[in-house]
Structures are given as C-alpha cells and as structure tokens.
Image: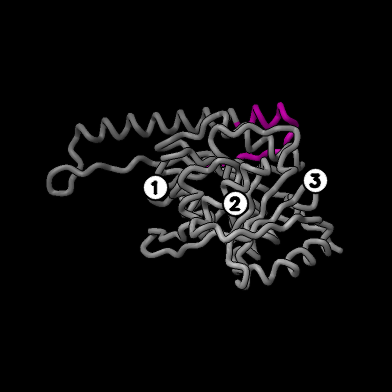
Amino acid sequence: MITPTFKNVLLPLISYPQPTLPVEIASAIDVAAAFKLRLVGLDVHIIPPVAAGFGGYAMPILYTTIDAEDAKTKANAEAIAQDFLTLSQHRGVAADLRRVTSEALDGPGLVAETARLFDLTILSLAPGSRAARELAETVVFGSGRPCLLLPQKWVATPALFDRPLVAWDASRAAARALADALPILQRAADVNLIIVAPEQSQAAHSAPDVERWLNDHGVRVTCTRTDGAGDAAKAIAEYALGIRANLLVMGAFGHSRLRDFILGGVTRSVLADPQLPILFSH
C-alpha cells in the first residue's frame, strides 16, 4: 500500500490590507515541524488600489497618500518575510521564500493558482475578517488542493491533530476531503466520523463502506450519526466540542459567479467563526 503524505506546503504571507501576524506564521510553522514538511512562504506584496478623483483621474494629493500606503505595505512585507525565515530556522523547518506582487483584487486568485502545485495550503482565518475569508474561499474553491484553515489565535499542542473529526455526507467533496486527510488520519490516535443525515439517507447507508475504506488504509474510526435537527453546522460543532476534537475534516460546497461565492450553509457557518482547525477540500 502506498502511504500518502504531505511534502510541499504553501503559506501565503499577506501585507495588505490585514498583514499576516507573527502568531499566524508561528502556528503554520508548528504544523510544518510536526509533520516534517517543507514550507514555502508566498510573500504577496499587494499594491494598494488607486482612488479616483473627479472625472476618473487621481488627484495629486491622492498620489502622496497612495505612495505612503505602498511604502507601508512594503515595510509590512519585509517584516513578515523576516519573521517567517527567522521562526522557520528556529524550529528547524525547511523553508523557502517566494516573492510576488499583485493588485489588491488579484491577490486571492494569484494565491489559489500558486497553491495548485502544493500538497497543502495553510491559512489563518480571523473571525469577521472579510479579506481573510475571501482568500480562504478563493483558495478552497480555486486551487484544487486541500486547505488547512487555522483559527487566528489557535496554538499548537504536542498532541497535534491526534483526535480528528470527519464530517461525512457521501458527497464528492466529502470523499475528496477524506482522501486528502489520510496523511493526518493515519497518524491520529482517535479518529471519529459524524454523519448528520436521516437514518435512511445515502450518507447513513454508506457508513460501513467508509469505515471499511479507512480500515484498508490503516485507520480505525468510530462512526456516529445524528439527524442534526436541520442544523448540520451546529450538530457538527457540538459533537466536535463534546469529543474534544482538535481538527475537523470536511468537504466544501459552493460555486463562483463573477468572483462571488455562494456557499452551502455548513461551509458558510464554519468559515464565519472557526472554533478549531479545519481541513477543507472541494
């Protein structure tokens, strides 16, 4: 049996409008250290948008403001890059830095395109941050690769991801997430799977097959089903809290139209305020 693994992992380092924080970099490096990953920091220097004056032309005073804002984002980018390299070296993580420049509106798309050639992308998600959520949505739905979302204030523990919870609904996205998470599930001490669906649903009927597939890949799992009373996101969150899960694995639902994402209810709820790390696949 060929054991899947993560090797090359992407960490976007954003300078504007909300710079990546040192604690966010440290969390990603902790994950890389635990799984012995090669980490590539994508230093994205965002060019601040040009504000238009009368007749669509930028007034002279605006150029001064724009230059000052651009200088600030460059300084942010340099500081973030230095934090990344210093912390990686301190933790003994193999790390490289890649620098790119992008217009503000093109930044998330550029990150998603880059992520297509990495095994995993790690992102931090701050509650209420529109920019962070847009980046996460774009990478999850546009990269074709799994994405690990870490709550902004999350701190790694020695028992990293040893108690993952897999959300299963028999969909294509859920199957993709299950397969993508194998490198984590295979080293976990206690794997749980929750099915939020009626007893006669396809998801419930497929539970024995899911358990058999995981067993074939060296993963022992405990399966639980609940109807969820119509609120799958709440049922998953409560169950995760009850078993003290330290990772949620789930498929993401949504589609794009003119760069706006219309998300499935569970995906939207989880992205709004993540309570634990989430491995998303689409």
Q: Are marks 1 and 2 in contact (CB under 8 Å)?
A: no
Q: Is residue 266 left or right of residue 212?
A: left
Give the mark toward the camera: 1 or 2: 2
Query: Which residue does the numbered mark 1 point to in the structure image?
Result: 103
Q: Which residues are magenta?
A: 84-99
x, y percentage for residue 178? 68, 60
**The one of 89 and 273 positioned closer to us in this rendering:** 273
Looking at the rendered structure, the kind of residue marked 3 is Ala
Which of disc 1 and disc 3 is earlier in sequence? Answer: 1
x, y percentage for residue 250? 60, 56
Looking at the rendered structure, the kind of residue marked 2 is Cys
- Cα gap from disc 2 to disc 3, whole angstroms: 22 Å
Q: Residue 168's image quarter?
A: bottom right
Query: Which residue does the numbered mark 2 point to in the structure image?
Result: 147
x, y percentage for residue 182? 74, 56
SS label for mark 3: loop
Which of disc 2 and disc 1 is earlier in sequence? Answer: 1
Looking at the rendered structure, the kind of residue marked 1 is Glu
Q: Residue 17: say if magenta.
A: no
**The one of 198 and 170 positioned closer to us in this rendering:** 198
Question: Relative to 193, does residue 163 appear above or below in the rendering?
Answer: above
